[in-house]
Amino acid sequence: MEEGTNMMEHASAFNRCIADLQRVYEVYKSEDKAVMLLTSLPPFYKLFRMTHMFSNGTFNYEVVMQDILIRDRMLQHS
């Protein structure tokens, strides 16, 4: 993802890539998808990425995606 790219567009593109891989019988655990999503974010998300990767809480794709979209909305409204 490049700086300034719309997060919803990035999330959609990421989900399309995962769906394409799953069509060729590639299976990913939720944790694997979360790591791939976090590493696809631009440098601007470094602290956010580190917080999620090293937290002791639940680490799954749905939670990470939700947190990213919430953060993006908060940044747009500030």
Image (cartoon, rainbow, N blue to C red):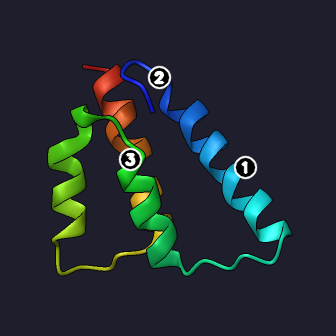
- Say which residue label 1 marks: 16
Q: Nearer the viewer, mark 1 or mark 3?
A: 1
Report, in whole angstroms, how far the alpha carbon at label 1 lies from the one at label 3: 17 Å
In-image side of 75 versus 40 (left or right) = left
Asked whether 64 or 3 is in front, the reply is 3
In-image side of 18 versus 58 (left or right) = right
| Residue drawn at x 17%, y 57% as measured from the top left | 50
Looking at the rendered structure, the secondary structure element under dot 3 is helix
> Tag 1: Cα neighbours inside 10 Å, few (<14), some, or many (≥20)?
few
| Residue drawn at x 36%, y 22% as measured from the top left | 3
Q: Which mark is residue 32?
A: none
Q: Which mark is residue 5?
A: 2
Q: Quadrant of the N terminus?
A: top left
Asked whether 20 or 57 is in front, the reply is 20
Q: Nearer the viewer, mark 3 or mark 2?
A: 2
> Tag 2: Cα neighbours inside 10 Å, few (<14), some, or many (≥20)?
few
Task: Choose the circle earlier in sequence order: 1 or 2.
Answer: 2
Question: Residue 2, percent across and down?
Answer: 42, 25
Instruction: Give the amino acid type for the residue marked by disc 2 in the picture.
Output: Thr
- Say which residue label 3 marks: 68
In-image side of 2 versus 19 (left or right) = left
Question: Residue 13, percent across and down?
Answer: 65, 40
Looking at the rendered structure, the secondary structure element under dot 2 is loop
Is residue 58 depicted above or below 50 in this figure? below
Question: Residue 20, percent across and down?
Answer: 79, 57
Instruction: Give the amino acid type for the residue marked by disc 1 in the picture.
Output: Arg
Is residue 39 depicted above or below 22 in this figure? above
